Amino acid sequence: MDLSRFPAETEGALQDVSHADAIADWISRDDISAFSAIMTQVNTSRTADVARLDSLLRGMAANHIDPAVRARLVKFYAMFKIVELLRYEKFHGFPD
């Protein structure tokens, strides 16, 4: 067992939980407040965190069981990609 990877993997898992909490918060807000929170999250996060959030948000938007929530998550993902484009001044594509 390679314990040298444990801290990095633990940090990644904790970051995913933090991102999931942020997305749950966006869902609980009205669209305008959620869009504002998305802008803040993307503009203040490290690039690696933005990439992880991109992957998680895309997955949730594609797979959420509730169609109404899934539709909102798709809107949130579109806003996320626009803010990401504005921040980095280029389109980063979609995660694998």
Image (cartoon, grey):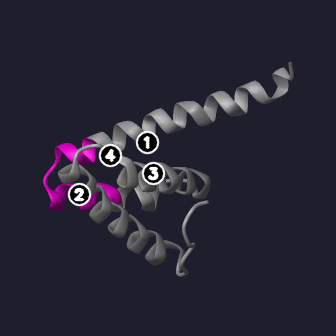
The residues colored magenta run 25-38
Residue 59: image location, x then y, percent: 45, 51
**Gap between marks 1 and 3 measured at Cα:** 12 Å
Quadrant of the rendered image containing residue 65: top left
Q: Amino acid at mark 2?
A: Arg
* Residue at disc 1, secondary structure: helix
74 sits left or right of 91 in the view: left
Quadrant of the rendered image containing residue 51: bottom right
- Considering every residue shown, the one lying at the far bottom of the view is 89
Would you name the residue on which mark 2 appears?
72
Q: Nearer the viewer, mark 2 or mark 1?
A: 2
Please tell me which residue is depicted at 50% across the width and 38% down the height of the picture.
16
Q: Amino acid at mark 1?
A: His
* Residue at disc 2, secondary structure: helix
Instruction: Name the N-terminal-most of marks 2 and 4.
Output: 4
Q: Amino acid at mark 3?
A: Gly
**Gap between marks 4 and 1 measured at Cα:** 16 Å
Instruction: Specify the label residue 59 is tagged with.
Output: 3
Please tell me which residue is depicted at 44% across the width and 62% down the height of the picture.
43
Instruction: Name the N-terminal-most of marks 4 and 3.
Output: 3
